[in-house]
Amino acid sequence: MTARGGHDQIALPLGETAHPASAAAQALMAFLLRLRASGVADTAVLRALETVPRELFAPHHFADLALREIALPISCGQIMPEPLFVARAVEALAVEPGHSVLEIGSGSGYTTAILARQAQRVVSVEYFEPLAIECAGRLARLGIENAWIRHGDGVALAGELGLFDRILINAAVDGLPESIAAALAENGVIVLTRVDEAGRGYLAAIRDTPGRGLVESRIGASRLGRLIAA
C-alpha cells in the first residue's frame, strides 16, 4: 500500500500497530537501501553499517534521527557526519581484513566502529579528551576489541604508532604532514578532506601507487572542518 506523496508502507490489520522491533528493522532496511541508491556498493561497508547501531553513537536527544541522512552535533563543538559521507570515506579506503588502520579524529566513535568491523586493528586518535573517553566507552559496550582510542594530537602521534595500511583523517588538511606520509605502509591509502581555491571542501584519496608515488584523486563533497592540532 502506498500513501500519496509518502513512502511505501506496509498495510496492517485495522486497529493494529507495527511492533517496535519490526519498525526498527524496517527503518534499518530503508537506511541501507538509501545508501545503495546513493551509490554505496561495497558489500563489506554496507554490512558494517548494518551491524553498527548509529543511535548508540548519537547524543540521546538525537537518537531518533540516527538513521536520517543528516550530520548530528556532538560534544566539544564537533559533529557526527551524515551516514553517506562515512560510507563513502570508508569505501574509498578499501579496507581489507588483514589491514591496520589509523584514524585521526575519533569523534563519536561511529566511524571507528565501522572500520573495526572490516580491519584487523584500528588505532584512533582524538584531540578532545571527553570525546576520547566517550568513544572508548561505546566501543566497549559493543564488545569491539580490535580498536584502541588514544587521546592527543593525531599528526604528532602518527610517527610513534607504527605503519598503517590505511589512514583516515576526519578533517580538512592542507598538504600532507610528514608524519602521516611516514606512517603509510607500501601500497597504502589515505582519505582526507581538502579545500579548493573557492573554499569548497571535498573528500580525497591519496594512494601509494607503484612507480608513481602518492597519487591523489577527488571523491566527493565534504563539509568537515580544519584539522585541530597542538
Image (cartoon, rainbow, N blue to C red):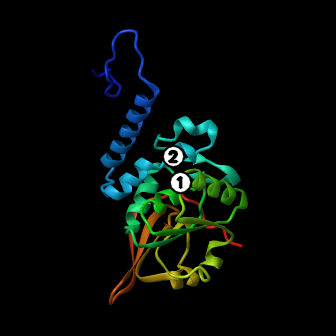
- Comparing 140 with 39, the one in front is 140
Q: Is residue 43 above or below residue 169?
A: above
Image point (41%, 47%), residue name: 50
Image point (62%, 82%), residue name: 160
Image point (57%, 56%), residue name: 109
Spatial separation of the CA atoms under disc 2 and disc 1: 7 Å
Q: Is residue 180 above or below residue 3?
A: below
Q: Is residue 52 above or below residue 129?
A: above
| Mark 2 vs 1: CB contact within 8 A | yes
| Secondary element at image label 2 | helix
Amino acid type of the residue tagged 2 in the rendering: Arg
Residue found farthest to the bottom:
211
Query: Is residue 220 among what the camera can see?
Result: no
| Secondary element at image label 1 | helix
N-terminal-most mark, 2 or 1: 2
- Comparing 200 with 177, the one in front is 177
Quadrant, the C terminus: bottom right
Displayed quadrant of residue 107: bottom right
Image point (58%, 83%), residue name: 179
How many numbered circles are shown? 2
Is 71 on the left or on the right of 214, as rendered?
right
Q: Position of residue 48 (x, y in %)?
A: 41, 54
Location of mark 2 (residue): 54
Is 1 on the left or on the right of 131, as rendered?
left
Is 2 on the left or on the right of 100, as rendered?
left
Q: Position of residue 56 (x, y in %)?
A: 56, 45
- Comparing 41 with 12, the one in front is 12
Location of mark 1 (residue): 110
Amino acid type of the residue tagged 1 in the rendering: Tyr
